[in-house]
Amino acid sequence: MGAEHPRVRRACPGVAAPMTTGDGLLMRVRHPIGGLDAAQACTLAEVALRFGSGDLELTSRGNLQLRGLDTPGLETARAELEAAGLADRDPEAEAVRNVLVAPATDIDPEAAMDVQPIARQLVRALGATPRLRALPPKVGVLVESGGDLPLGRVPADLRLEACTGPGGVWIRVAVGASAQAATVLGWARPEKAVDAALQVLEQFLALRQGDPDPPGRLPGALARFGAKALTPPGLERVLPGGDPIAARSSENADSGIGAGLNGDAFGVAFPFGALRAEALRGLAEQIRGGEGCLRLTPWRSVLLVGARPIALDRLAAWGGVTDPKDPRLAVSACVGQAGCSAGTTFTRADAAMLATAARGLLADDEYLHVSGCEKHCGRPANARMVLAARAGHYDLSLQCAPAHWETLLVGLSPDQLRAALSALEQIAHAERGGVLAALHRLGPAELGRRLNAMVNNGDET
């Protein structure tokens, strides 16, 4: 890689300010509200091939990352992405443009409303409000509207959630976690939602001022200062008739993979979110010449809207997955040693090897995450198990409560991983419950002892 560029970040990269990684520079294109048209998708593919390695990554925030870029091509790459409407010239404005919108509210008859205009207005307002550039770069806003592809389980700092209530559509303004667990600040009509969001973010910044250890995210500020400190004036504190979002019995876990929405969309996932530029270019060809688009989802998938029919074997040749039950979708992994200087293992190869075993241990919306180091980069919010590498070996941890993990095994070689998951499944079956039931019944120390004995000695004693 060439000499270091003055606008290179160490974390939270963008196009205006990429990040140094083990395989070159990484550019992150912020979530495109409304999707990519064919020309934009082709521009991304060509930039990735000409100035980078051609490797792309879909993220859990609906962003797209270009890997393996080198310094000499940065300015040209930036210029082409800016000209295509995919990037900001100002790195500070780009850094706060973290808005994720539900992928299909404009074509979903079950959605309360199309929330894309709200998301676009919010993006413009964030970029045009200089004082909001002080927001920590990981702070994100989610805008959704229920329906067949809801974002109820997708985490965010600030949630703007449309629903049908008394007198029409309302926007629930809430902080953190999932739709079911979020703390509701109040309710606004759609035309007031952006102003309410901006006020919440400004009050968050005010709470951070002068604090020697300021909270980096809105849920942290909520826990420290309470909901009242973040709640702007003008919100309806209670919605007459109750909270329609909280009253939902369960969120639809469908991530739009395969055909859906009355045939108006087709979703294809990519294991670990990894795809080649050639695949993106091929998907773009399916929407060229029409009104179609490619929408990036938080499930590391691409939703093709208005696309021509595409052969499944062609998608498979590009690495795409169209079966929501494919076991590879039960595992996630950072890039590992293949593309990160901190990675000590080939995480994605190890994760792929474990996919079938992991599927049997997890609920439909849970993950095993394989990390090449202790930082756990890219770990999904609903990861239930983590394998974190240290010096080429892995430690196995389980989440037993929100934000609470128990490490059960340490120093597993890659060759021992499948045996460890098999042992965990055997113990869970013997205890006549799932993995969490076994953990709670036996306790972490005893469960770890049994696992260690089975992995190393082939028995439980």
Image (spheres, rainbow, N blue to C red):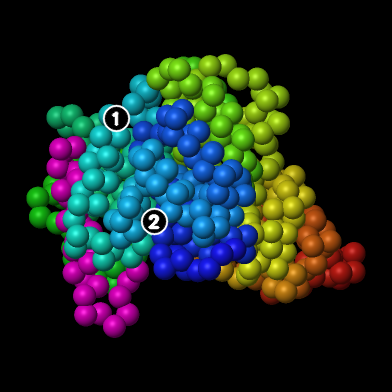
Q: Which residue is rendered at x = 49% and y = 17% of the image?
A: 263
Relative height, residue 109 to residue 250 (above, below)? above
Q: Which residue is mark 1?
A: 114
Q: CA distance from mark 2 to mark 1?
A: 30 Å
Q: Residue at x 33, y 50 (%)?
A: 88
Q: Quadrant of residue 218?
A: bottom left
Quarter of the image for the N terminus: give it: bottom right
The kind of residue on which mark 2 rests is: Ala
Residue 401 location in percent, x, y? 52, 63
Q: Label 2, on which residue?
A: 16
Which residue is pictured at 15% across the width and 38% down the height?
191
The residue sitting at 75% across, 55% down in the picture is 350
* In this view, 120 is above or below 427: above
Residue placed farthest to the bottom in the image?
A: 212
Please, what is the three-letter code of the amino acid marked with disc 1?
Asp
Q: Which residues, given as a range, are shown in magenta?
A: 188-216
